[in-house]
Image (tube, rainbow, N blue to C red):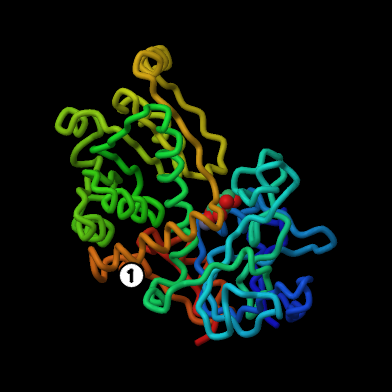
Amino acid sequence: MKAVAVTPGTPNSVHLQDIPKPQLDDIGGGMGVLVRVLKVGVDATDREINDALYGNAPPGDDYLVLGHESFGIVEAVGPNVTRVKPGDYVTATVRRPGGSIYDLIGTNDMTSEETYYERGINLLHGYLTEYFVEEEEYIVRVPQGLKHLHVLMEPMSCAAKAVHQAFEAQRRMRVWRPRLAYVLGSGQIGLLTTLILRLCGMQVYTIARGVPPHLKADIVEGFEAHYVSTQKLPLPALVAETGRPDLIVDATGNSQLAFEAMQYLGHNGVVVWTSITGGSRQIEIPSDRVNIEWVLGNKLLLGSVNANREHFELGIRDLALGEMMFPGVCEKILTNPVDGLGNYQEMMRLLVEDDSALKVFVNVAE
Ligand code: BGC
Ligand code: ZN
């Protein structure tokens, strides 16, 4: 069967690869789920893997099948599978366990080992192909009523984890009632985080460069949040208007902005960083001022990567609630379909060149 793959270490090596079709029995214990792939989303991670900034092939292979944002339909299940059945829509988690205690308790996203195993990213093949087989444990059911949001499940899981982690960490406060949040960046993670925070009842400012009118601002406003263009209102001026936020989530992909944001957080607040910044940028920051303010304000900086099954389930609930509260807004994120695995060049071109392509995804099958 066909798959879209790269040769790790070789820039711009994206190509079509012929790979064997997986079998249900590839997974032991009767716990396998065979999924026919319908759609796969791609993001900056796929672009950076194709740029050879990171990403490794599974041992013994010289290629890595791309794709970590999966959506498909169950075709067959092993005799001991109970959570899903043929005909169900599903997605799959990305990270697989290593050997740390966190992996052993099912929180692979919190592994304490340097090496991590991620389908489509590191050491494991991804989903940008016709079929995949997975253990039931890593398969998450997508409600029929959310199938139009297909490839958003995985990015949503990462946003859900980031927010959940902030609340978990803020238990240190005994009482934490965040009212004001800034979301930096209006890509898929910024927009989905905006939705989650709005569903928590926060006042949300989603901050990016582009001057409206444009789709991203429309989506933010569709979630009844405020879109702010830094070209119209720089951050210090916004802070003067709103006061300092209780929570800042950075999803800009720009480490300079991630550090700059630290200057604006309110007392007892938390900044969450979610971007994977593959570059080697260096910046100057007012370090004494940030340092003293962070100490005097008991502030917290939190990194958040990936998501486990619990976050997929949280994210799916929030997408369902989001559809009730703000009908039809989420699907506006799904801007750029590409038809068929054979169109992988167009897929990569959109990722690399088209700034207006908010979400690129491949229609693999009907
Ligand atoms: C993926 C995450 C993954 C991270 C680091 C992101 O693009 O969505 O699942 O953990 O990259 O590889
Ligand atoms: Zn991703």
Q: Position of residue 103 (x, y in %)?
A: 68, 47
* Up/down of 93 relative to 287, above or below: below
Q: Quadrant of residue 25?
A: bottom right
- The residue lying at 42 percent from left, 63 percent from top is 316
Q: Amino acid at mark 1?
A: Glu
Residue 273 visible here:
yes
* Up/down of 182 relative to 236, above or below: below
Q: Quadrant of residue 343?
A: bottom right
Of 243 and 52, nearer the camera is 243
**SS at badge 1:** helix
- Residue at the outermost right position: 60
Q: Position of residue 41 (x, y in %)?
A: 50, 67
Q: Position of residue 155 (x, y in %)?
A: 46, 58
Of 327 and 16, nearer the camera is 327
User: Crowding at label 1, few (<14), some or many (≥20) Cα neighbours within 10 Å?
Assistant: some
| Left or right of residue 284, residue 10 in this image | right
Which residue in the structure is indicated by mark 1? 331
* Up/down of 223 relative to 362, above or below: above
| Left or right of residue 18, residue 338 in this image | left
- The residue lying at 71 percent from left, 60 percent from top is 124
| Left or right of residue 215, residue 26 in this image | right
* Up/down of 309 relative to 270, above or below: below
Q: How many marks?
A: 1
Q: Quadrant of the N terminus?
A: bottom right
For label 1, being within 8 Å of ligand 2 is answered no
Q: Position of residue 277 (x, y in %)?
A: 53, 42
Residue 352 visible here:
no
- The residue lying at 57 percent from left, 59 percent from top is 46
- The residue lying at 73 percent from left, 49 percent from top is 98
Of 62 and 329, nearer the camera is 329
Of 45 and 75, nearer the camera is 75
- Residue at the outermost left position: 241
